[in-house]
Amino acid sequence: MSNSFLIRTEKLYKKYPMGPTVLVALDNINITINKGEFVGLVGPSGSGKTTLLNIIGSLDSPTEGSAEVLGNKIETLSHQDAAKLRNNHIGFIFQTFNLLPVYTVYENVEFPLLLQDIPPAKRIELVMQALEWVGLADRKDSKPSQLSGGQSQRVAIARAVVKKPELILADEPTANLDAKNSHNIMETMVKLNEELDTTFIFATHDEKVMKYLKRKITLNDGYVQRDENISLNNQ
Amino acid sequence: MLIIKLAIKNLLGAGLRTWLNVIALSFSYVAIIFMQGLYAGMNNQMEASTIKVQYGGGQYWHELYDPYDPLSLDDSHAKIPNEISGLIKNNDAASILINQGSIYPNGRMQNILIKGIDPNQKILAIPTHFLNNQNGFIPALIGGRMAKSSGLKKGDFVTIRWRDAKGTFDADEVKVVEVINTEVSEIDNGQIWIPLDKMREMTVMPGEATLIVLKQNSQFTKNLSGWEFKNLDFLLADLRSLATTKSAGASIFYFVLLFLAMLAIFDTQILSIFRRRKEMGTLMALGMTRSTLIKLFTLEGSMHAVLAAFAAMLYGGPLVWYLAKVGYGLPASTDSFGFALGDRIYPEFTALLIIGTILLVLTVTSIVSYLPTRRITKLKPTDALRGKFI
Ligand SMILES: Nc1ncnc2c1ncn2[C@@H]1O[C@H](COP(=O)(O)OP(=O)(O)OP(=O)(O)O)[C@@H](O)[C@H]1O
Ligand SMILES: [Mg+2]
């Protein structure tokens, strides 16, 4: 049953040298995440949420232990292969949106498809589909500077989902949004999770996000304090 | 190509800064092409007129003749060899006899070269026909520079002294029948031209010459014993090396210009790599490799040179076209260049010059753009996303 999981970490450590001592940012993380899960990494600031998310996203590598993501051992992945993994299989959503300022909404969403060499006709179709999912088809020619925070984050979601990745990683996606926009964003992601069976992992300490989660992994000082499945009738 | 599209987009998105760099760089293009074209035009013009009035199609020199040693002139003359005398009769070659002498304008002594030339020669574009005017005096032609240094004018008589073949001093008067205006100082400075026959008579050197000038494009290649053939490459060598020195001197100017433009590009590159760390992090998260990032940023930098080429074409093109057509008027004092110049220069802008300049600027810009991007190889995606310094 080696292929039933999407992500598995084993005895995963991330340590940063801090002068004479060592800061243990991730401390023996052993988790398994399956396809279609909607998982939140929660915990106080500095507990290691971003660090874990980055390792899963192959943006960073573990100091010790192993992280297997979509059949790739992150700890042994070359830069090129890591880039390929992200390009083909992982979408990122950032707290600060990180849209490319000189491109239009349409071009921002199209960007991952350009990196994948997808033919133009197919690109148009996928971009428009993604923009409709997030309800921004009518703003496709706007520049990021002309959008509100909520709209920007929806563009970022469209950019993450446009290539239909198996996995979307979102680091504090609602931190810069007001309540209404946060709910809107979360509902969009729940919808995508249900319709496309895309796996979502969030790093968050936003209470508004909690009620959407189907699984909550609580980190504290780098170790997993609690890992709970939340049944739907709890909501 | 994706990165070309991206590079153009990023560059145009950067706005004013890009255009300032582009304009600065375009000055380098225009300056290099203009100056080099001007020098090329100047050199070619100069070579052409020097060939016309001095070198013809090459020269036979008496084996002892050394233009840098006036003392050699006493011995460097001989009878014209039979092989070439027919050529001279047919006006396919002209002989010149040179000797040392002095003139006494206003009682001052001035050492000069006396050059005897056939008044009817058609080989050199010197108006020697004025020397046919020989009514009881020895006619002499001088150039404008000589006229200035001696104070002589057309119609003036001046005492001339020389030594004949046996070394005996003799003197007479010559009349300046014409002052000729020439671009070529070497047929002008410190010399007077008189009829060849008269000169041979004065020096007691019948039938002799110091050098024989062939008609342009002459096919005559015989070896003449006692004489050495000097082809145009030899004769023009000094002129060409002078031209190279002059244009090298001028290139300092546009290398400074290019250097300043490169400084601006380098600065822009450094700045954009620091300012756009987060963007680079995002691109990496989206799956771009570092090497593609390096290519993208290098391309963005080198693209300045491409845009600058277009900008240069826009305003430099008409300028260059106009100058090539109308010529470039030189200030009066250009004789200080030390070589022959007309009062208008027609710059020559060859495709080679233009393409070469574009390639040069493009290469230099690419290198300068690439250097700062090497930092990206050390960039960690996580640091970049946090906006941390590399
Ligand atoms: N590059 C680094 N060098 C040194 N220490 C680091 C580095 N990155 C993270 N850390 C440390 O690792 C620990 C975990 O950081 P991390 O960013 O994962 O926390 P987080 O849970 O995402 O916090 P927040 O909720 O504030 O985003 C922190 O103590 C942080 O200071
Ligand atoms: Mg964090």
Image (spheres, rainbow, N blue to C red):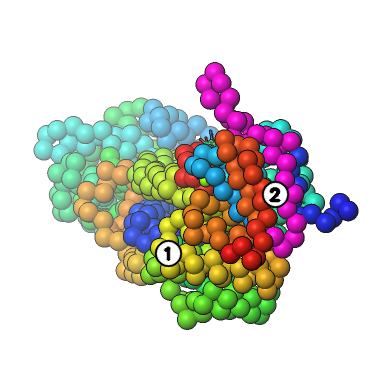
* First along the sequence among labels 2 and 1: 2
Identify whether B71 is placed above or below B184.
above
Residue lying farthest to the top in this orientation: A20
Q: Which residue is mark 1?
A: A179
- On the image, which quarter does residue A113 sit in? bottom right
Prevailing secondary structure class for the magenta stretch in the rendered image? strand
Of all residues, the one furthest to the left in this rendering is B106
How packed is label 1: few (under 14 Cα within 10 Å), some, or many (20 or more)? Answer: few
- Image quadrant where residue A123 sits: bottom right
Q: Which mark is residue A82?
A: 2
Across and down, in percent, residue B256 comes to 36, 43
The residue marked by circle 2 belongs to what chain?
A: A
**Per the image, is A21 magenta?**
yes
Q: What residue is shown at x 33% (from left), y 34% (from top)? A: B100
User: Callout 2: few (<14), some (14-19), or many (20+) C-alpha neighbours within 10 Å?
Assistant: many
Q: Position of residue A44 (x, y in %)?
A: 51, 42
Can you see residue A20? yes
- Nearer to me, B364 or B65: B364
Helix, strand or loop at label 1? It is: helix
Which residue occupies 19% across, 41% down? Answer: B149
The x, y position of residue B55, in whole percent, is 46, 50
| Numbered circles on residues, count | 2
Image point 74% across, 36% down: which residue? A11
- Using the rendered image of the protein, determine whether residue B291 is visible from the camera's viewpoint: no
For the record, the magenta segment spans A11-37
